[in-house]
C-alpha cells in the first residue's frame, strides 16, 4: 500500500496542472469506483493498488466532509448544517474497510446509478448503511 501511495504522489507531483483531467476533479463514476472497491473485499496482495484507490477515495471523501462541516459550523453558526447539507452518522469506530464494504453493497444494489459520479454515490451509501438516529 505504501508503494501505491508513493507512486500516486509521484504522479501527482510531476503532472503539469493544465493536464488535470476529470479524475482530478473527482470524476470516478460509480462503475469505475466499484471495480476498485470490489478489490477491497479481497485479501490478495496483488490487488493492493485497487484497494488503495478505493480506501483513499473513501478517506478523502470523509476528510472533505469533515472539513466542510467544521468550516460551515465555524463561519455560519446561526445556520443548522443538517438543514443545508445533511449529516453523516458513521460511527466513530467504523473502519475504512467496513465503509468500503457498505459502498460496494450499495453500488451492487443500485446498478441503475453506476453512471453517476462516485462522489455523490458514496454519500448516499454511507447514509443508507449508517442512518442517523431520529
Image (tube, rainbow, N blue to C red):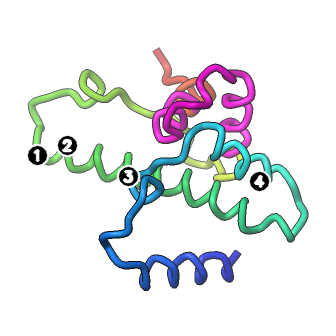
Within 10 Å of the Cα at label 2, are there few (<14), some (14-19), or many (20+) other Cα atoms? Answer: some
Q: Are marks 3 and 1 in contact (CB under 8 Å)?
A: no
Q: Which residue is mark 1?
A: 75
Location of residue 95 in the rendering, given as x and y in whole percent from the top left corner: 66, 52
Location of residue 126 in the rendering, given as x and y in whole percent from the top left corner: 56, 33
In the picture, measured across the screen, residue 63 lies left or right of residue 30, that is left
Location of residue 69 in the rendering, given as x and y in whole percent from the top left corner: 29, 43
Give how far apart the Cα atoms at labels 4 and 3 are: 21 Å
Question: Could you say whether the residue bearing mark 2 is in a helix, strand or loop?
Answer: helix
Question: Could you say whether the residue bearing mark 1 is in a helix, strand or loop?
Answer: helix
* Start-end of magenta stretch: 100-125
Farthest residue to the right: give it.
44
Give how far apart the Cα atoms at labels 4 and 2 are: 32 Å
Q: Is residue 101 above or below residue 39?
A: above
Tell how many labels: 4
Q: Which residue is mark 4?
A: 40
Q: Are marks 1 and 2 in contact (CB under 8 Å)?
A: yes
Give the label, 3 or 2, closer to the camera: 3
Question: Quick check: is 105 in the magenta stretch?
Answer: yes
Q: Which residue is mark 2?
A: 72
In the picture, measured across the screen, residue 11 lies left or right of residue 16, that is right
Give the label, 3 or 1, closer to the camera: 3
Q: Are marks 4 and 1 in contact (CB under 8 Å)?
A: no
Q: Main secondary structure of the magenta part?
A: helix
Query: If you read the primary sequence from the N terminus, does the residue marked by circle 4 or circle 1 appear first?
Result: 4
Give the label, 4 or 2, closer to the camera: 4
Question: Could you say whether the residue bearing mark 3 is in a helix, strand or loop?
Answer: helix
Residue under the image location 49 percent in, 37 percent down: 117
Q: Which residue is mark 3?
A: 64
Give how far apart the Cα atoms at labels 3 and 2 are: 12 Å
Amino acid at each position: 500500500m505504501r508503494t501505491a501511495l508513493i507512486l500516486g504522489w509521484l504522479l501527482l507531483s510531476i503532472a503539469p496542472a493544465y493536464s488535470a483531467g476529470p479524475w482530478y476533479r473527482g470524476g470516478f463514476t460509480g462503475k469505475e469506483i466499484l471495480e476498485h472497491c470490489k478489490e477491497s473485499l479481497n485479501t490478495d496482495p496483488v490487488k493492493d493498488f485497487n484497494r488503495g484507490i478505493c480506501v483513499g477515495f473513501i478517506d478523502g471523501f470523509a476528510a472533505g466532509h469533515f472539513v466542510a462541516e467544521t468550516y460551515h459550523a465555524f463561519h455560519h453558526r446561526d445556520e443548522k448544517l443538517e438543514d443545508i447539507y445533511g449529516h453523516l452518522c458513521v460511527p466513530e469506530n467504523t473502519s475504512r474497510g467496513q465503509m468500503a464494504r457498505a459502498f460496494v453493497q450499495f453500488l451492487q444494489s443500485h446498478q441503475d446509478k453506476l453512471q453517476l459520479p462516485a462522489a455523490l454515490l458514496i454519500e448516499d451509501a454511507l447514509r443508507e448503511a449508517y442512518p442517523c438516529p431520529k
